Image: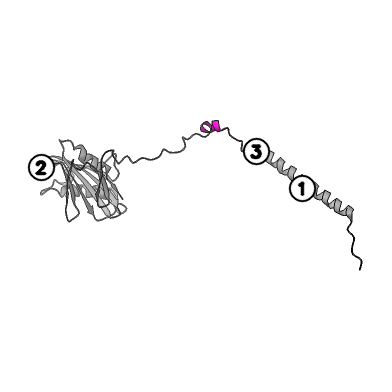
Amino acid sequence: MNKGKVNVRVVVLVVVLAAALVAAVIVLMRLLGSFQSPATPAQNPGQQTTDAPQTGEPPAETDDAAPENLPAQSVGQLTLYYADDALQRVDSESGLTTLLTGTEQLPRLDLQRVDGSLQELTDAELQRLAVGLVQSYYVDAPATDAISAAADGVLQDAWVVEMPATDDAPALTARVRFLEGSDGLWYLLLLCPAEEQVPDALMTAYETASAS
């Protein structure tokens, strides 16, 4: 058999056509690139701060509940902030923790776990629970209809309860706050005579409490 001869003209023609095709592809890609570039213009580095304002991003959150220069104190899964020498702490077997000012019984801040969950209790039920907790401090508590209770305007799940004077107790103002931690539902009850100002240490401990 005779071996087939390679036609040089055919080879040259194929090479020329391939080169033309490659050149056409390159030109087409450059044209496409030139059409797309206006959609994503390059920015001058000096203009980035003005062309991309940061007002749309919220500022980094800070922990306002942690006062400066006050150590964190733990009660179960609650965290409060007060100086060690500012308050006297009394823990009982039942889980009750009382923070007293000196040896006085009032003002005081009590913390204790209770049955229930914030998800299971309505606002009305929380209000009734707050009133009942304050009434439990009395031997002969004022009638419920004589007690004023209003939601705290600042703290969530918190109530301000005004107790009238009785034969053996002055008028009292109670602040009751509910916090739910991984160890259950807690109440914080800050009790003070209505005519007195709550000590700063007790108020700070009450307001800065958080649950984990």
Which mark lies nearer to you, 3 or 1?
Answer: 1
Residue 128 appears anywhere in the view: no
Residue underneath mark 2: 169
Q: Nearer the viewer, mark 2 or mark 3?
A: 3
Quadrant housing residue 168: top left
Residue type (three-letter) at the residue carrying disc 2: Ala
Q: Is residue 95 visible?
A: yes
Amino acid at dot 1? Val
> Of helix, strand and loop, which one carries label 1?
helix
Q: Residue at x 52, y 34 (%)?
A: 52
**Looking at this rendering, what residue extends furthest in the left direction?**
167
Callout 2 crowding tier (Cα within 10 Å): few <14, some 14–19, many ≥20: few
Assign a secondary structure to mark 3.
helix
Q: Is residue 45 highlighted in magenta? A: yes
Packing grade of label 1 (10 A; few <14, some 14-19, many >=20) is few
Front-lying residue, 62 or 7: 7
> Would you name the residue on which mark 1 appears?
22
Quarter location, residue 176: top left
Q: Are marks 3 and 1 in contact (CB under 8 Å)?
A: no
Q: Would you say residue 138 sits in the magenta stretch?
A: no
Tell me the CA gap for discs 1 and 2. Answer: 99 Å
- Image quarter for residue 195? top left
**Which residues, given as a range, are shown in magenta?**
43-50
Residue at the image position 18 percent from the left and 37 percent from the top: 199
Identify the residue under disc 3: 37
Tell me which amino acid carries mark 3: Ser
Place of residue 63 in the rendered image (x, y in percent of width and height, measured from the top left): 33, 41
Mark 1 and mark 2 lie on one chain; the one further toward the N terminus is: 1
Mark 3 or mark 1, earlier in chain: 1
- The secondary structure that most of the magenta stretch takes on is helix
